[in-house]
Image: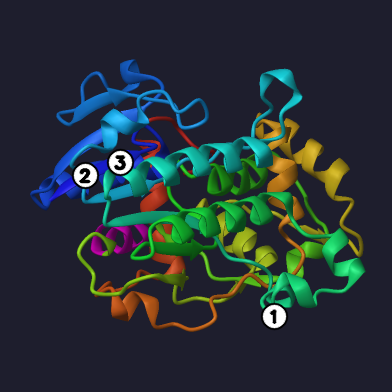
Amino acid sequence: MEILLTGASGFVGSLLLDVLRREGHDVRALTRHPDRLSSSPAKVMRGDAVTGEGIERALEGVEVAYYLIHSMEASPGGVSFMERERIAAGNFAAAARAAGVRRIVYLGGLVPRWEQAGAQQLSRHARARRSRHLESREAVERILLDAVPDSLALRSSIVIGARSRSFRLLVRLVERLPVLALPAWQRYRTQPIDERDVIAMLAACASSEISGEVLEIGGPDVLSYGEMLERIAEAMLIGRPAVRLGVNLTPLAGRVAAAIAAEDPELVVPLMEGLQGDLLARDDRAAERLGVRLHSFDSAVEHALAEWERAEPLAAR
């Protein structure tokens, strides 16, 4: 099958590229920075979804296109990441439809339980605290599925992997904070999922008979964010007392967390904005429908930490 993979140099895209090639697909990798894939055996093509450069040529003859383009960092000219993501998705969707692409596969994020009734039913207070990050993911999802009806979108919670920036943030906080000060969002629950399971489900989407659906995917364990941090600390053999706070203070807490983890606050603050309720899949059937057996949270963490340590040391491991 002829497949176009965007975001091929990113965390998820680089892992998916290897799997798709092993399964015998002809994969084109689309990136703004071809030099980052100079050693890749795939056909690497230069393109930019925001400007539209190279998109039409890259999509010629493609049956399935993976859209793994996410960006929350600041951009020149003051354009918000939400607007930039909508422009990029619109350009890609229009080009895919014109090229006759059969399916687009997209990876987005779960939304809080209090949002699952639909945005039109939210109270004014609830709308005011919607996450920009998750709202943008939903907007991109709608653009892509409306353009190519046979498309599939996966919504996941935090992906546990050595290169996952969300997971790396949690690890750095455990590693560098002598006491874990947990804001009020630490009580919310989610279903962290192993990178291996996400990649397997994405790969299965290329040939799945499921059509035109949004599949919410999660790992088998339901954990609060506080419990996740405690389990990560146990896996790292670090004792960390926790202080549970009654407030969130997201803008301040996000910037403090970013500084501690040496991460970009433009990434961390929008991520923390999404912690406004439980992030749980509506049902547990997605993995079964896609033929994927899920790994436990502890297995996912051990795998991710082992992969991490191959590149750099971690405290107390």
| Residue 259 figure quarter | top right
Q: Dot 1: few (<14), some (14–19), or many (≥20) neighbours within 10 Å?
A: few
At x 23%, y 69%, the residue is 208
Question: Badges 3 and 2: C-beta atoms under 8 Å apart?
Answer: no
Q: Position of residue 288 (x, y in %)?
A: 31, 80
Dot 3 crowding, Cα within 10 Å, few <14, some 14–19, many 20+? many
- How far apart marks 3 and 2 lie (CA) works out to 10 Å
Residue located at (87% from left, 74% from top): 123
**1 or 2: mark nearer the eye:** 2
Visible in this render: residue 178?
A: yes
Q: Which of the two residues, 88 or 288, is positioned nearer the viewer here? A: 88
Compare marks 3 and 2 and give the one earlier in the sequence.
3
Pinpoint residue 143: horizontal percent, then vertical percent.
52, 54
Q: Which residue is mark 1?
A: 117
Which residue in the structure is indicated by mark 2?
Answer: 62
210 on left or right of 252: left
Amino acid type of disc 3?
Leu
Amino acid carrying label 1: it is Ala
Residue at the spot 21% in from the left edge and 43% down from the top edge: 18
Three-letter code, disc 2: Val
Residue 175 tag number: none
Instruction: State the CA–CA distance, disc 1 to disc 2.
Output: 36 Å
Viewer-closest of 121 and 294: 121
Mark 3 — residue? 5
73, 59: nearer the viewer: 59
37 vs 65, nearest the viewer: 65
Q: Which residues are magenta?
A: 196-204
Residue 65 point in image, percent of width and height: 30, 48
Q: How is the image coloured?
A: rainbow
Q: Quadrant of residue 203?
A: bottom left
